[in-house]
Image (spheres, helix red, strand yellow):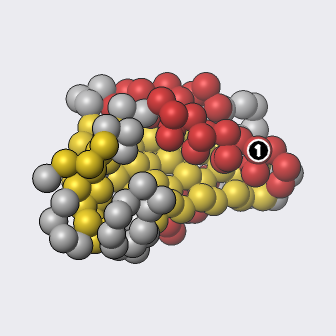
Amino acid sequence: MIAFARVTERPLDVTEHMDAVAHASQGATALFVGTVRDNDPDAEGRVVQLDYSAHPDAEAVLAELAEAADADGLRIAVSHRIGTLGIGDGAIVCAVSSVHRAEAFDVCRALVESVKAELPVWKKQVEADGSYSWVGLGRLG
């Protein structure tokens, strides 16, 4: 069951994700929270913010990815944030509950990996000196 799959400008609420997948039949919940860090192997300086933008169909794609990960007995809540995010802000939250832990861990990880690979959301990485880069597109500014 997909509780929700959202692309949003609102700050992500971990408790909301956990509550959405909680159920008396579930014995395990796996949670992934991806946050903005102040460094990147490709950055020449300190990262100060990320600007995420999304294709208009991004939320529909996220819902399709969640549906593809869903299986009998699972509960899934996943969100990706867009807009300007500062260091420490949550960029993605994925919660998966199941009867047993192994499936919750496996599905949570697989869903996060598919979101990273397939969701049409782009990241502009801004450094302390004002320069910026788009992941995979090189340094600009």
User: Looking at the image, which is closer to me, 64 or 113?
Assistant: 113
Q: Pick the quarter of the image with the N terminus.
A: top right
Residue 10 showing in the rendered view: no
Q: Say what amino acid the circle numbered 1 marks.
A: Asp
**Residue 88 picture quarter:** bottom left
Report x, y in % for residue 91: 40, 57
Residue at left 53%, top 62%? 33
> Could you tell whether 26 is left or right of 42 in the image?
right
Residue at left 30%, top 26%? 57
User: Looking at the image, which is closer to me, 139 or 105?
Assistant: 139
> Could you tell whether 127 is left or right of 116 in the image?
left
Using the image, determine if residue 29 lies above or below residue 124.
Answer: below
Q: Label 1, on which residue?
A: 106
Residue at left 38%, top 27%? 60
Report x, y in % for residue 8: 29, 49
Disc tally is 1
Q: Residues within 10 Å of mark 1 (few under 14, many from 20)?
A: few
Residue at left 24%, top 43%? 53
Residue 79 showing in the rendered view: yes
In the displayed image of the protein, which residue is found farthest to the front?
Answer: 44
User: Looking at the image, which is closer to me, 111 or 27?
Assistant: 111
SS state under label 1: helix
Report x, y in % for residue 45: 33, 69
Using the image, determine if residue 81 lies above or below residue 86.
Answer: above
**Residue 68 picture quarter:** top right
Using the image, determine if residue 75 lies above or below residue 40.
Answer: above
